[in-house]
Each structure stands twice: as structure tokens, then as C-alpha cells.
Amino acid sequence: MYDGSPRRDELAARLATVRERIDRACDAAGRSAEDVTLIAVTKFFPASDVAILAELGVHDVGENRDQEASAKVDELPPEVRDRLTVHFVGQLQSNKAGHVARYADVVQSVDRPKIARALDRAAAAADRRLEVLLQVDLSGAAGRGGVAPEAARALADEVAESEALRLRGVMAVAPLGEDPAPAFERLAGVAHAIREGHPDADWMSAGMSGDLEQAVAAGATHLRVGSAILGSRPLAR
Ligand SMILES: *Cc1c(COP(=O)(O)O)cnc(C)c1O
């Protein structure tokens, strides 16, 4: 008689495969897997999946849409929520930023001063502190979100001076249709430049289901993995 949960078994199996990939990539790069944090990106999937992943030892989850994320976080039992770090990884508008500041622990997608100021005000008003990554545009083709690499240093200085935000580093998505390895090396260069002025800002969030190996090789400290753990998402919404 089978009395387990099929969804739990499925998530456990995929999670094990992803952890093996990370271990192998770390071995190849001469890095310790302990220095790499796996963030399960749970967008489009229910709070029950988040709860299962938490039970399976995942401590970090990522979401990219404000409404979906806040509803999901609210739905989690408090004892599950309290053990998780919630990362917001989606594009932000300044009118939404205040809302995100109420439930996210880390905001990875700060790409302009206006967003930083909106997050800072809202977090301070809610008596919360937020960890912040600057999203860097590696495509060179404005529009997909992200600060231009050459403007990242000034934005870092601005975030570092805010009251309720703590600058932790950088984040990027590899450009479509380009080899991710050199793109992640460019991100590592931006991360390095920012660390010269802000030594604590040592996080580099890069790498998704399809390119986590290249991200580990370039020095990523945080991987954002969705479909390789949760399964494929509905195409567009
Ligand atoms: C959805 C998403 C991911 C995860 O993508 P997968 O290819 O499913 O692993 C990572 N980062 C961001 C910003 C995302 O929106």
C-alpha cells in the first residue's frame, strides 16, 4: 500500500537531481557546495509545494509576481514561513515596491534609484529590514530590466546609504540566445567592482535550471532554480 504523497516524491526526486548537479559543478570549480544557496523559484506553483520543499530542506524560495507571492506567503503556516527566506526576483514598479517590502526578506531586482527609495520607505515604515541585490542587465539591450553594468556602482552607493536596505550584491539573468558563461563572467566583474566599495556585498545570484553549472563556474553564491525542481510552468500568463 502506498501512503506517501506522489507530489512529495516527485519534488524530492527532482530536488535530489538538482543538488547533484550543484555538487558536481562545485567539484569542477573547486568550490564548496556549502557556499552556494539554492533558491527554489516557486512561481505558478501552490503554497503546498512550498511547504513540501521546506520539509525537504529548502530554506530559500523565490517569487516574481507581487500578488501571487504575497497571497502564497500568507497561506503558509507560520512555522513554515518563519523558517524560509523569501526572495522577490521579479521586475518591480515603484508603486508595487512598497507592497513587496512587507513580506519579502530579500529583493533581488533593484535596478533604479526610484525602486530603492520606494522599498526603503516602505520597509522603514513597516519596521522591517530588507536585503537587496542589484539586478544587472547583461544583454546590453535595455528593456528586460536591470541596471547597465556601468551604472551599477552608483546605484550600489545609493542603496548602501538607505535606512532599511542592506546591499548584499548583484543578480542577473543570462541574455537569451547567448552563451551564459561569458555573460556570468561579466556579472562577476560588476560584483567585484561593487565589492571594492562595499565589501559585505558578496552575493552573486545567477544561474537557473538551464545554466546553473556556468553560474557556479563564474562564482555564483545563489542559484534560482524553478522548472528543474517544480516541473514545467504554463507558458505565459
Ligand atoms: C522563473 C525565474 C527563474 C527560474 O527559472 P527556471 O528556468 O525555471 O529555473 C529564475 N530567475 C528569475 C528571475 C525567474 O523569473
Image: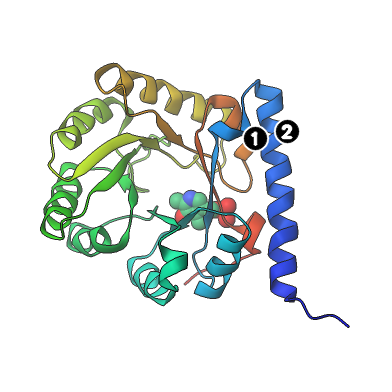
Tell me the residue that label 1 is attached to. 213
Label 1 sits on a secondary structure element that is: helix
Locate residue 162, reporting x and y percent: 13, 39
Q: Using residue 130 as the reference point, say whether residue 158 is left or right of it.
A: left
Locate residue 191, reporting x and y percent: 38, 25
- Dot 1 amino acid type: Glu
**171 or 55, nearer to the observer:** 55
**169 or 176, nearer to the observer:** 169
Viewer-side label of 1, 2: 2
Image quarter (top left, top right, bottom left or bottom right) of the N terminus: bottom right
Q: Residues within 10 Å of mark 1 (few under 14, many from 20)?
A: many
Which residue occupies 71% across, 60% down? 12
Q: Using residue 117 as the reference point, say whether residue 99 is left or right of it.
A: right
- Tell me if the residue at label 1 has its CB under 8 Å from ligand 1: no
| Residues tagged 1 and 2 counted as in contact (Cβ below 8 A) | yes
Tell me the residue that label 2 is attached to. 24
Locate residue 229, reporting x and y percent: 64, 57
Which residue occupies 41% across, 33% down? 203
Q: Using residue 27 as the reference point, say whether residue 173 is left or right of it.
A: left
Q: On the image, which quarter does residue 187 sit in? A: top left
